[in-house]
Each structure stands twice: as C-alpha cells, then as structure tokens.
Image (cartoon, grey):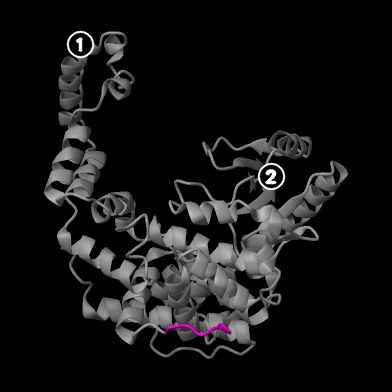
Amino acid sequence: MRKAPPKAEYAGREAAFSFLVSALADHLHGRKTEPAADLDWEAFCRLVRAHQLAAVVYRQCGSFLPDAARAQLEKEYGATLFVYANRTSDLQEIRAAFRAAELPLFSVKGLAVARYYPVPNLRSMGDCDLLIRPGDEEAAIAVMRSLGFRHDGEASKHAWTCVRAGRHFELHSRLAEEDEYPDPRQSAFFNGYMSFTREGELDWSFHFLFLLSHLRKHFLTNGVGVRQFFDLAVLIERGPVLDFTRIGEMTADLGLTGFAHACYSLIESWFGVTAPADFRRLAPADAAAVTEKIMSNGVFGFADAKNKYSAARRSFLRAGRPRWILRLSMLARRAFPGYSSMRTYPGCGYLDGRPWLLPAAWAHRFFSILFRRDKRVQKETLHSIFLPEGELARQKELLRIMDLHGDPDKS
C-alpha cells in the first residue's frame, strides 16, 4: 500500500494548492491577489507548472513572487503569450483557407474557451483542436498541407495531427471515439455535433457539455488537472449564455448528472463560481479526497507516476471474475506473448512462418530480459499486474465520489 506523504509535506502541498486556486479565483473575479505567508514557493512553482497555469499565476502574483519563482514563471508567461499570438494568427489563416474551399470548420476546447478568459492569451495549450464535417477529411488535410502544415508523425487513429513552426493542430471529424466513450449513447450524441452548429461555431451549451464529458474521460483514464475545471468555471462566470435547463436534460439523458454535480461542487468550492443549476454538493471529506488526487495529477495526470497504471486499474475494477484469476491471466499473457507479437521481437526473425518455434522464442525473450541491464519496463509490468488492493480501493472510492462507479468503463 502506498505510504501517505509526511504531514509537513502534505500540508505544504495543500497550502500551495489552496493558494493556487485562490489566485485563479481572484483572476476570474477581477480581484488583486495578496501574498501568502510562509508558503513553500518552490513547491508552489512545481504545482503551477505541472498544471500549466504559469501565465495566469504570473499575472496575478508576479509583483510579490520571490526572485527564483519569478524567474521560473516569467519565462513560461512570455512563452504562453508568444505561442497564443502565433496560434490565433494561424487559426485566422486556416479559417480563411477553409472558407475559400467552402469547408465548414469549428474550433473546439482550448482556443474557443480562451476567448472568455479575463485575459485570453494567458490560457496555455499544447495544441489546437479543429473540428471538420465528417467526409471532409481528405479535402481538409489538403487545405492544411497547402498552408505548409505537415503531419507531425503522431500515430493517432482519432485525428490528423500536424505541425507548422512548432505549433501543433489536430483535425477531428469525430468528437467521441468508442474506445474513449464506451457508453454508445455518449459517442453517438457527441458525434452528432453538426446538428449543434450555429454560424460557424458549436452551440455553447453543447460545447460546455462536451468539455464536461472530456474532463470525465481524462478523469477515468490518465488523470485530469485544475485547468480543465477552471475552463468550466470561466464559461459559467464569463462565457456565452448557457442554457442550464437544457444542459441538465442532456446530462440526465447521457448518464452524466452525478459527475456534473461533482464538478460543479468542486468549481464552487475552489473558484467561488456557482453553476445556475440545482446540484448536489460533495461532502467536505469527499471533496478533500478528490482535491488531493487532482492536485497530484498535473494537467493531464503526468505529474502522478501512478497514473501510468490507470489501464490496469480499469481492468481490475471492471473485472467480472476474482482478481487473482485476472492477475494470473495477465501474467501468463505477458510471459508468453502470442505468435503475431513474438515474430517481430528483436532477434526472433527465425519465428516468421514457423509458429512451432514459439517456445524457443519465449526462451530467447526470457534470457534477453534476464541479462538486460535496464529492467524498468519489466518492473512496471509486474507492478501493474500486482497492483496493491489499497490502491484499487482508493481509485474505487474516487469513482464513487465522482459518481463514476456505475460507468460502463468501471464496474
């Protein structure tokens, strides 16, 4: 079972997180942020950078940050402004080219949400998501190539990913994939986005619901951070008119009501933004448990090393058989891969066309691993198979709190 962090260390992280969400709330409500006494600024900067919120925090706190912290965040502040300016210029050029080609184009998530930030160019983003009409994929890619964008080499079955001058864009003709949204109601609903388009934009009530469901997807998989919740808070507080009666009906139809209420509760407690809906607040202990997890995640869960085992956790929590049987089955599959996998294993070319030599290839692989100096992959594999029950119990409790314990992806 994972050891709890020392009390002083956790208290320091908790204080850093509390100050972070307070600074974000101040930014959203147009208030001045006052310095915090006895804050561990090094821990605070690590947290801010992990959640990719350096630009907003620098804007709010730059006047009183210690020199070392100011130097760290100032650099990211400048980079965020530079990238945003160039990315918005890129998007104007792309929109003009798509209009000329008579191809519909919609901005989704990052850049679309950034327009409603108090200072739009402070919203960081690693890429820009663009939504096209189903069936327009080849024509849309041709337009992007004509503008100098090239495929960035990412192997994605869900989007065409491209880059120009170091700035990444993703072209999507689907909002939801079945492997990401296992409830067919949700994937069918979100992939019907063309009926929710208005004057070159996605209807914002629909868009808000998609952001909520996208947050849910990350919560269920590799993890989610504060920025995604702040996006929702920005839209509720400063965004376009949202029809919360309609949003409530849609969340009920899609089985997202409980999760939406949990998100609204966190947004209210962190940022002082109350969704105009009748929602159930989380109990203080439950809110604290989820806050601790989100705090440790970073923006997409990468700051918490344990999130690399999220797929294994999902397998165990949705298993319909005793876990010891599943563990043995997983161990057997990892120890004795099938023919199609082993025929491409380094040094096992002799196996091609000779499936009867599979036992020899297994022995070859075993001794290769045995004498390999770096065994990190094998250690991680074993850890994923033998995940401690306490770790699974903690994840199950988080799913209960966020009303995801009955999700099709988690039983």
Q: Quadrant of the C terminus?
A: bottom left
Quick one: 25 or 65, which is closer to the camera?
A: 25
Q: Earlier in the sequence, mark 2 or mark 1?
A: 2
Which amino acid lies under the numbered mark 2 shown in the image of this protein?
Ala
Q: Could you tell whether 397 is left or right of 1 in the image?
A: right
Which amino acid lies under the numbered mark 1 shown in the image of this protein?
Trp
Q: Residues within 10 Å of mark 2 (few under 14, many from 20)?
A: few
Residue sticking out furthest to the right: 100
Q: Which residues are magenta?
A: 275-280
Q: Quadrant of residue 118?
A: bottom right
Q: Quadrant of residue 146?
A: top right
Question: What is the number of the mark on residue 407?
Answer: none
Q: CA distance from mark 2 to mark 1?
A: 51 Å
In terms of secondary structure, where does tag 2 sit?
Answer: loop
Quick one: 245 or 227, which is closer to the camera?
A: 245
Which residue corresponds to mark 2? 165
Give coordinates of residue 103: x percent, y percent.
Answer: 79, 44
Question: What is the number of the mark on residue 356?
Answer: 1
Q: Quadrant of residue 245?
A: bottom right
Give coordinates of residue 405: x percent, y percent.
Answer: 32, 65
Q: Quadrant of the N terminus?
A: bottom left
